[in-house]
Amino acid sequence: MPIAATTPGVNLLPTATRTVTPGSYLTNAQFTWLQQYLPDTYEAEFERYGNRSVSSFLRLVGAELPSNSDLITWAEQGRLHIKYDNVTSAAAAASATAVWTIGTQQGNATPPNNIRVGATVYIQTTVGGVLSNKAIVTAVSGQTFTVAYYESGGQSMAASTACTVFVYGSEFPKGVGAALGANAMGSLDSSDAGQFFQNSPIILKDKFIVSGSDMAQIGWVQIDTEDGATGYLWYLKSASETRLRFDDYLETAMLEAVPMENTTNATVAKGSQGVFYVVNLRGNVWGANLPTTLGDWDSIVGRLDKQGAIEENALFVNRDLSFAIDNMLAGLNGLVTQATTPTAPINVSQGASFGLFDNDVTMALNLGFTGFRRGYDFYKSDWKYLNDASMRGGLPATAATSTGIINGLLVPAGTTNVYDQVMGRNAKRPFLHVRYRASETEDRRYKSWVTGSAGGAATTDIDNMEVNFLSERCVCVLGANNFMLFRYGAVS
């Protein structure tokens, strides 16, 4: 049978000199024997981004508690004393009596009227010049209450002027019972309106898949990851990074989660209430660039005075806010007087002094502050999540273009008492904590399992190893009125 093809041919031409030629050795796209000198390879992988994990926030300020329900509900105490904003009277200035109407309160167009006959009240204008009166309540009806003024000049403010009123006591004549009306000594019961809050856990998942053949493939670069995985098997790197990424998402999801408010997408996901969402909704918000002066912090302290007045507070901040605080505190000390010209001498008698020791002018000066006291104690900590370029740290950083940029979060320290409906009693809880689903037979705090037929698993006939991760959790922000979010514009 004749040979049909003339190729491959036989090269009979000898080489005139001792030189390697393309036909002398086998080559492929990844490796060539034509390369005379082998590269000097660094054995270990270089960690150019350092520790890439952004989790740690909730581990520092919160706790994790089990829950066996799809809905977590808790009650928070309301105000003890009675106060209303946006009250108006049709009576003219100098009137001896007036009927005041309680307007919309925090979105409630018909708030309950808890003012009673016989109560003594303080009324003050909220706009224009500060005008005030003290009066006694003589009648109550629906959203109105009638007062008789103590001052001889009668009502100080003009008709229809928006005012604030609060109850500071009561007064009754001798021997009088119900003569002042049925509401004179009526009982004030605690109301649950606006005092109960709830959140729902969400399920988080991730997985890593590797074939059995790849598990047996050696690599030439040694890998070392943040969780301690090390070796020359490259699949270990992917497996470790999958776990690290999932660990980070367990925290960042609790920060960023929002409820599903779009009814069209209600069947896709239900969402949850994350820290940023809750504080932006029910907490305090600093939305005017960065607080860089004592006046700014005085206004923050003034707001905290009106809330829970928690003595110690932690500040988790990005680099911009951290430097703004450092610069403000440094500016309060006697810094070295700067010379008017480059060659003029400087006044070293005013060397900076910080903390317990006076720094000599020749010493390296540490301008980073970890805490300060201004009405309350504030402890500052850099928050990697807000600085990381792959997370919120990579968003626009200028005020003009940074709508929704979060610069920091103030978190009250300690615990608070809440009524736990599952336990049926008051319980101490951290202001910020995570609830995860768990029962006697199923713990969904952090589940991990392996399937496949490689890596020790023997559950399927598929030649791979599949590592699964799952958690079901939500975050509870108790007393959101004690938190403060530092941001530009509206939170996105």
Image (cartoon, rainbow, N blue to C red):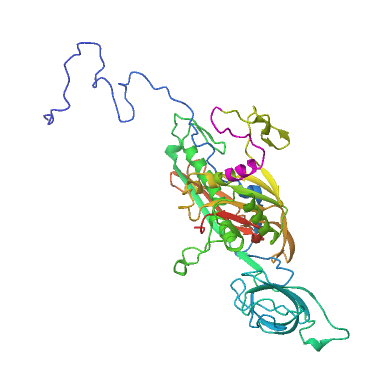
Question: Residue drawn at (43%, 38%), measured in percent from left and top?
Answer: 214
Instruction: Look at the picture and state if 434 lies above or below 95.
Output: above
Residue in the image at 63% along x and 40% along y = 330
Res 192 visible: no
Q: Quadrant of the N terminus?
A: top left
Would residue 59 be visible to someone looking at this image?
yes
Pinpoint residue 318: horizontal percent, then vertical percent.
56, 46
Residue 326 in the magenta stretch? The answer is yes
Percent from the top left, x then y, of residue 59? Answer: 63, 48
- Total number of numbered discs in the rendering: 0
**Which residue shows up at 16% across the image and 16% down it?**
13
From this viewpoint, which residue is outermost toward the top?
17
Question: In the displayed structure, would residue 424 be above or below residue 314?
Answer: below
Position of residue 25 in the picture relative to residue 477 (left or right): left
Q: Which residue is drawn at 66% across and 57% down?
A: 66
**Which region of the structure is painted magenta?**
323-343
Quarter occupied by residue 183: bottom right
Residue 133, x across and y down, in percent: 72, 75
Q: Position of residue 148 (x, y in %)?
A: 75, 82
Q: Please name the predominant secondary structure of the magenta segment in the image.
A: loop
Q: Does the magenta stretch include residue 185?
A: no
In the rendered structure, the answer to whether residue 170 lies left or right of residue 19 reads right
